[in-house]
Image (tube, helix red, strand yellow):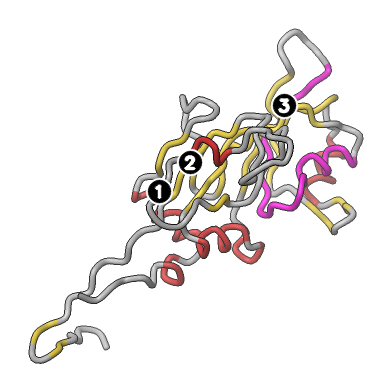
Amino acid sequence: MPGARVAFDGRPVVGRPAALPRLLIYHKPAGELVTRSDPQGRPTVFDRLPVLARGRWIAVGRLDLDTSGLLLLTDSGELAARLMHPRHAVERVYLVRVLGALSGAERVRLCRGIRLEDGVARFARLEPLRADAGGGANRWYRVALAEGRRREVRRMFEALGHPVSRLIRVRFGPIGLPRGLPPGRWVEASPAQVRATLAAVDREAIAERSEIG
């Protein structure tokens, strides 16, 4: 009831604010795996992360070996699951370098939807950027989509005959890849960034961990 107060033995009980999950913003370089260990001994993103006193870091989705850019990691399994769940449609933004320029018809198809082996996939936005320096055949695009299927961006372009040679994730939900953050380095998200991320997937449903004392 609004305005109600809780008391025990005549004394008011004060609830502590819900603890915010921790969230790391990591700049993944190409050549690192998003896995805890690799039988071949290749480097993984977890090799570079700070040690948690309790729990463990959970990657929010995956980037394949050849993809670089923004990777979020959290100590909250619930937050990670919600960010990855298709129901919440959290937007991902990538810079993509492909072989050859897309025609107008191809750009329309990629936004209206093309059929892959695991269903129809579409970009929410597709923006041409520039050609590679030197006048080569490669072209850059900025794309956004609201799901994270396996190698989805690569498969969409390849389905139209445009192999992807570079793929860089620059945004996940409200969090962007910070300018100046070198590959292989991380920064911790600010409380404001964490709250914005919680809000993207229903903050109230996650921040239910307040303690009474």
Task: Tell me the residue that label 2 is attached to.
Answer: 25
Pick whichever of labels 3 and 2 is earlier in the sequence.
2
Task: Tell me the residue that label 3 is attached to.
Answer: 140
Q: Which picture quadrant has residue 161?
A: top right
The percent coordinates of residue 119 (x first, y second) are 85, 59
| Residue bounds of the magenta highlight | 137-159
Task: Tell me the residue that label 1 is attached to.
Answer: 193
Q: Which picture quadrant has residue 67?
A: top right
- Residue at x 55%, y 41% (from the top left corner): 46
The percent coordinates of residue 102 (x first, y second) are 83, 31
Q: Which picture quadrant has residue 110?
A: top right
- Do residues under tags 1 and 3 come within 8 Å of each other at their CB atoms? no
Badge number at residue 179 = none
Q: How far apart are marks 3 and 2 (CA)?
A: 24 Å
Q: Mark 2 is on which residue type?
A: Ile
Q: Nearer the viewer, mark 2 or mark 1?
A: 2
Secondary structure type for disc 2: strand
- Residue at x 73%, y 47% (from the top left corner): 123
Other-residue count near label 3 (Cα within 10 Å), few / some / many at <14 / 14–19 / ≥20: many
Quadrant where the image shows the C terminus: bottom left
- Do residues under tags 2 and 1 come within 8 Å of each other at their CB atoms? yes
Q: Mark 3 is on which residue type?
A: Trp
Magenta run includes residue 153:
yes
Foreground residue among 205 and 26: 26
Q: Which of marks 1 and 3 is in front?
A: 1
